[in-house]
Amino acid sequence: MMVWLHLFSEQSITEDCINVIFFKGRPLAYMLTKLCACCVSMYAILGGYGLSAVFSKSQGKMNNGRRALLLMTNFWIVCLLFIPMGCIFRPDIYPGDWPQLLLNISAVSYSYNGAWWFLLPYVLITLCSGYIVSLMLHASLRKEMAILLALLILHVGAYMAKDYLSPSPSSLKQLAVVGLNVIYLLFMFSIGVAMFKHRCIQTLRSRMEHYEKKRRNAILVLALIGTCVLRISIGNSALINLPFSVLIIMLFSLIDKPHAFTSIATFLGQHSTNVWLCHYFFLNMLFQGQVYALRYPLAIFIAVLLLALASSYLIKMIFTPIRNRMTNVAH
């Protein structure tokens, strides 16, 4: 979803491609970016849900410092591999001056790679997640609603405030943007915690059990398709994505999926972090948009995804031994 979003979110670029399918008079490739923009809220929600499960299973022993360090180590390996390439192919961007280099490798700035804006805010939320999850899980319903309402107000405020700070190269303002992104993501993360606390997926599953399996799957698939079509039919604001993300996660979780699909999804999941961290280099940073010479949106998407997956294997060759050693030291 993220790769498709970054490839085709500009309508002018998409219209220069050879488009076969249109929706409401516009290329489907472009319209689908409205749905794919849900990737941020879906990741944050699932992060809250997953870390709540870890908290519950481990009785609060989450090892979040190690988890954050591993993610940053993975990121630094990507930097080590791609920044030297950038210096060769795009010396106008890489490495820049020393402050720019330091701000990027610390993930405060994302001028090297636009997809990195999410990294440091998510790392900071992960580090604080033990407190956040504990607070939400142990709160009364009334207190939980008050927390979520306060976070929703901050979420909307941060979304609006980011536009005034993002264009600034000032280090202090870049730090302010990181803070705003933390606030922006925190509400989504907390929705994931609430979904875990109230067993939303399990409750919906139990209510669907009285339907015959094929009929249940048909209802869920149609509901999922309807949700996706509705999302691409309305506005572009990221604030719209959250309710759709919740619905998509719940419906998708309940559908009985073929084993082959699950195997492919598991494979992609194993490489998803590296695809996130490095795919943007192939869009325009290194190749300066040359990937669009393939003309067909699906061909462009597959080419970038394959390049990112190939890079992921190289990254894993370096990262896996480091991760194993860190795990052994921790134990």
Image (spheres, rainbow, N blue to C red):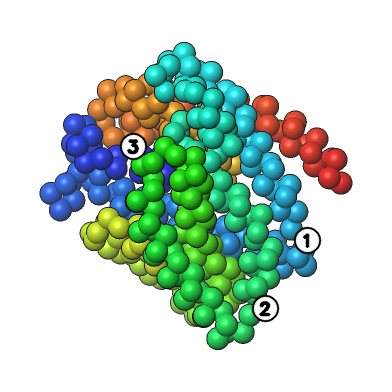
Does 221 appear above or below 304? below
Whichever of callouts 2 and 3 sits on the residue coming sooner in the sequence is 3
Q: Disc 2 marks which residue?
A: 138
- For the residues marked 2 and 3, what is the alpha-carbon distance in whole angstroms? 42 Å
Does 34 appear above or below 129? above
Is disc 3 placed on a helix, strand or loop? helix
Whichever of callouts 1 and 2 sits on the residue coming sooner in the sequence is 1
Give, as a three-letter code, the residue at label 2.
Answer: His
Q: Disc 3 marks which residue?
A: 7
Pick the front one: 72 or 300? 72
Marker disc for residue 61: 1
Q: Is residue 125 visible?
A: yes
Residue 127 position, x and y percent, is: 66, 54
Does 116 appear above or below 157? above
Q: Residue at x 44, y 39 (%)?
A: 170
Whichever of callouts 3 and 1 sits on the residue coming sooner in the sequence is 3
Give the class, few, some or many, for how many residues have Cα within 10 Å of label 2's Cα (few <14, many ≥20): few
| Mark in front: 2 vs 3 | 2
Give the class, few, some or many, for how many residues have Cα within 10 Å of label 3's Cα (few <14, many ≥20): many
| Position of residue 31 in the picture relative to residue 64 (left or right) | left
Q: Residue at x 34, y 51 (%)?
A: 163
Q: Residue at x 44, y 28 (%)?
A: 281
Give, as a three-letter code, the residue at label 3.
Answer: Leu
Task: Say which quarter of the image contains residue 137.
Answer: bottom right
Give, as a three-letter code, the residue at label 1.
Answer: Lys
Q: Residue at x 49, y 69 (%)?
A: 151
Residue 145 position, x and y percent, is: 51, 80
